[in-house]
Image: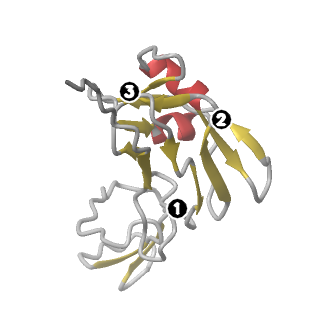
Amino acid sequence: AWNFTTADTKPANITFSYTKRGDGKVAKTSDITITFSKPIVKVGGAEITNADVANLFTLTKTSGANQGVKAFVGEINAAKTVVTILNSSLVTLGEMTELSNYTIALNANAIKCKNNADVLGGSDNFTTSDYTAPAVAVSAANPIADVVDTTATVTFASTDNTVLSKVYYLIEAGDANT
């Protein structure tokens, strides 16, 4: 009688995803999500924790001012198949800027599949979109000093959120100059 054991040694695939704007570029406010087709562990078999994520990947700014490796905070899900690089950490640390190119890469010899197989496709490049603060212009139909008018026009333009459906604004009493 023959006895043998088979093993799943097929490498895991890796997919990078981002929130993209209408121009096809990555929103400066996007998390970076890295999905693995199989559960991952650190090389050597140790479980990956949230504290490990920043040591397993490298985010590098490759164009514009302040090029180089950027700091971030990340999380890994309980199934060990999805890593999220938190945009809130990139914004807080000032690491993500508009109209810049970035590379996110899995560090060499950092992770393997839980079944000891390799991980394929360990890097991706992306460009951030233009982030412009909304421009607001207010005008009154009859801009005469100290005249109360019940009609005002508010023009709101934003390049960062093209699907904006509601804008809220507050009108406050001014003085002779506002």
* Residue 133: mark: 1
Image quarter in which the N terminus is found = top left
Q: Return the residue nearer the eye: 91 or 146.
A: 91
| Visible residue check, residue 31 | no
Circle 1 packing at 10 Å, graded few (<14), some (14-19), many (20+), is few
Badge nearest the viewer, 1 or 2: 2
* Residue at the bottom extreme, as displayed: 141
Q: Amino acid at mark 2?
A: Ala
**Residue 73 as seen in the image, left or right of residue 100:** left
Q: Which mark is residue 108?
A: 2
Q: Nearer the viewer, mark 1 or mark 3?
A: 3
Q: Secondary structure at mark 3?
A: loop
Q: Position of residue 148 (x, y in %)?
A: 30, 72
| Number of the label disc, if any, that sits on residue 114 | 3
Circle nearer the N terminus (3, 2): 2
- State whether residue 24 is above or below residue 99: below
Q: CA distance from mark 1 to mark 2?
A: 38 Å
Residue 22: image quadrant is bottom left
Q: Residue 82's x, y, as percent?
A: 35, 38
Looking at the picture, tell me which residue is in the foreground, 120 or 139: 120
Circle nearer the N terminus (1, 3): 3
Distance, label 1 to label 3, CA atoms, is 45 Å
State if disc 2 and disc 1 touch (CB < 8 Å).
no
